[in-house]
Image: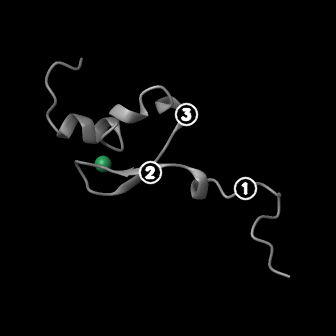
């Protein structure tokens, strides 16, 4: 009756690691672009990173 995914794909976010953004406080999920630096990622977006006022990142 109720299939969760018509395509047979796994639900994306369920399997992904996630963190809480240190700037906006929202949860965000792993992205491909972070696969090498996930441990270092602390904010959800470039915008939040800029807000955080990091110094030394061009
Ligand atoms: Zn954020």
Q: Quadrant of residue 1?
A: bottom right
Instruction: State left or right for residue 58 relative to residue 33.
Output: left
Q: Residue at x 24, y 48 (%)?
A: 22
- In the rendered structure, find residue 27 and report the number of the disc placed on it: none
Residue 8 in the image, given as x and y percentages of width and height: 82, 58
21 to 2, vertically: above or below: above
Mark 1 Cα shell of 10 Å, populated few (<14), some (14-19), many (≥20)? few
Q: Residue at 75% across / 70% down in the picture?
A: 4
Mark with earlier residue (3, 2): 2
| 9 is higher (above) or lower (below) than 2 | above
Return the residue at label 3: 32
In the rendering, which numbered label is found on residue 18? 2
Quadrant (top left/top right/bottom left/bottom right) for the C terminus:
top left
Q: In the picture provided, is 56 more to the left or to the right than 31?
A: left
Q: Nearer the viewer, residue 47 or 34?
A: 34
The mark total stands at 3
| Residue carrying label 1 | 10
- In the image, residue 25 lies at what x, y percent? 27, 56
Identify the element where label 1 is drawn.
loop
User: Earlier along the polypeptide chain: callout 1 or callout 2?
Assistant: 1
Q: Is residue 50 left or right of residue 39?
A: left
Tag 3 and tag 2, C-beta contact below 8 Å: no
Q: Residues within 10 Å of mark 2 (few under 14, many from 20)?
A: some
Disc 3/disc 2 C-alpha distance (Å): 13 Å
Ligand 1 within 8 Å of disc 1? The answer is no
C-alpha span from label 3 to label 1: 16 Å
Q: Nearer the viewer, residue 58 or 25?
A: 25
Looking at the image, which residue sits at the far right?
1
Instruction: Measure how far apart labels 1 and 2 are at the Cα level.
Output: 17 Å
């Amino acid at each position: 009756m109720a299939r969760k995914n018509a395509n047979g794909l796994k639900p994306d976010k369920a399997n992904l690691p996630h963190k809480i953004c240190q700037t906006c406080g929202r949860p965000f999920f792993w992205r491909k672009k972070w696969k090498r630096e996930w441990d270092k990622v602390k904010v959800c977006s470039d915008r939040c990173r800029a807000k955080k006022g990091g110094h030394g990142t061009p």
